[in-house]
Amino acid sequence: MMKPKLGLLCVTSGWFRDIGLQGRTSDSTAAVERVAQGLVDRLSVDAEIVSRGVLYDAADAARAAREMRDTDVDGVLVVPLMWCEEAIPRAALEILAGLPIILWVFSPRAELPDSISFQSMLQGSGAVCSLQLSGMLKREGTRYVTVAGHADDPAVYETIAIAARGMGIARILRRTRVGVLPFPSDQMSATWVDEFGLRSRYGVALRYLELDRVRLAARAATADEIAAMRGLLAERRVGVRVDPGNLDEGIRYSLALERILADEGLEALSMNDVIPEMHASFGLRPCLWNPRLSDAGTVVSMEADIAAAVAMRVLRLATGAAPFYCETLGADWRANLLLLGHAGYHDAATADPAHPVTVIPDVEYENSDRWTGAAIYFKYRPGPTTIVNCVWDGAALKWLAAQGESLEGAPRLEGNSHLVFKPDIPIAEFYRRAVADGVSQHWLAVPGRCAHELELLAGILGIRWTPGGN
């Protein structure tokens, strides 16, 4: 991702000037302007900053906001440097309505001296405005996230950097198009979304893809294209345990999906792979990994889980890693382990490098389809891991996350790509929280213990968040 573009609103009150407490050349004026420039310098490490310096009245704030709007900022950081009436930031935020907001409860210093002058106190009084402004924003239903800390607190800048990346992701999400092949599932209503709500709230649009279009694209794959994909799989050290005919048929559909996703400009695909119509048309489930889709950042969910596909797109942008699509297939209650896996398409970029990646028959359909299928099989990489559940809760997307460890060791499940997950909380508590919250069966695994970052991202994007064990 490119650096996000962040509007910086450093506000204070012209009232201090009006009553003679702060002249245009006073120490307080110079102090807050030095602080504002320091913020620009620090924040520029992680974002492109658009700022007009310290804003003293509503007209200043409106001019700054129009510049930010005209330069197409991704979001806004509001920093009251001193006490300030809400009318000043409000004048800017009305012009920037709809953009994500970070509100900083700010102090220029980490400590208070034993004795402080009135002027020096004023220079650190910005929290008054932040608290006042929060009441206005909340009552008006404006979405914002909050950071609190002093000007030299590295944790604050780290949090702002995460939030700013979220603002950039929000912009990308508004251009995201998800392919649905061919229609939503009538068997698993927890995977349903409100298509119009998804588009109006997040900007995500759906594109419905016909089975016959995919079938014809698969039939149009040339011998040279098939041979090139065989070579690419070999280059990525993918072993093959299916016969050449089944491998070639799997490659045909892998190429067909690649071509159609490119033609439609789709970044995500939600495949309804369990319907009889697909298997009657294709003779297999299209689940052979295409490394070029992986390299492009394309994500694929199964069982027409559209909410999961959107979450996979967001997680890929947020973490830089391909999410692993899975569900809870078993549990070891004594060792506090969950066996997570799923049939269908998987991104082998998530595989444990200590164990081989292979192409095997599609275990669920090898005896009923015309072809045995060609599915990718691997064990997920070990290390700290966060799993995320995503559903549409009736008005918005909702995430629940849990942190833990993906364990080392040999593969433990035949037939399906999988991971062995040890959550940080007891699995009984994990299940209790998940079921009480109302989730789907599908989880998305990403590397790292990143629930805090994902919670902040959810706040920026307007995704409802439920702690699930982080």
Image (spheres, rainbow, N blue to C red):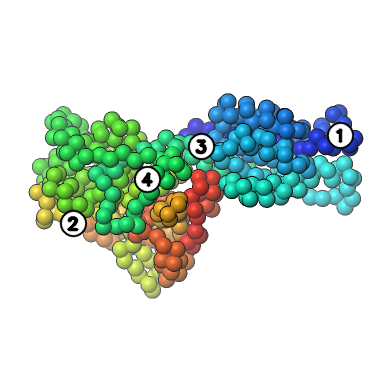
Q: N-terminal of the two: label 4 or label 2? A: 4
Q: Which residue is mark 2?
A: 364
Q: Residue at x 71, y 50 (%)?
A: 131
Q: Nearer the viewer, mark 2 or mark 3?
A: 3
Q: Residue at x 72, y 29 (%)?
A: 60
Element type at marker 3? helix
Task: Look at the image and tell me whether residue 402 can be seen.
Answer: yes
Question: x and y percent of residue 291 in the render?
Answer: 29, 38
Viewer-side residue, 107 vs 224: 107
Viewer-side residue, 153 vs 28: 28
The disc placed on residue 18 is: 1
Viewer-side residue, 54 vs 131: 131
Q: Which kind of residue does numbered mark 1 sit on? A: Asp
Element type at marker 2? loop
Q: Residues within 10 Å of mark 4 (few under 14, many from 20)?
A: few
Distance between the Cα atoms at labels 1 and 2? Answer: 77 Å
Q: Which kind of residue does numbered mark 2 sit on? A: Glu
Q: N-terminal of the two: label 1 or label 2? A: 1
Q: Residues within 10 Å of mark 1 (few under 14, many from 20)?
A: few
Answer yes or no: do the residues labelled 1 and 2 have beta carbons within 8 Å?
Answer: no
Question: x and y percent of residue 325 in the render?
Answer: 34, 52
Answer yes or no: do the residues labelled 4 and 2 have beta carbons within 8 Å?
Answer: no
Question: x and y percent of residue 261 in the render?
Answer: 29, 35
Answer yes or no: do the residues labelled 1 and 4 have beta carbons within 8 Å?
Answer: no
Q: Which residue is mark 3?
A: 168
Q: Nearer the viewer, mark 1 or mark 2?
A: 1
Q: Residue at x 55, y 29 (%)?
A: 72
Q: Which residue is mark 4?
A: 195
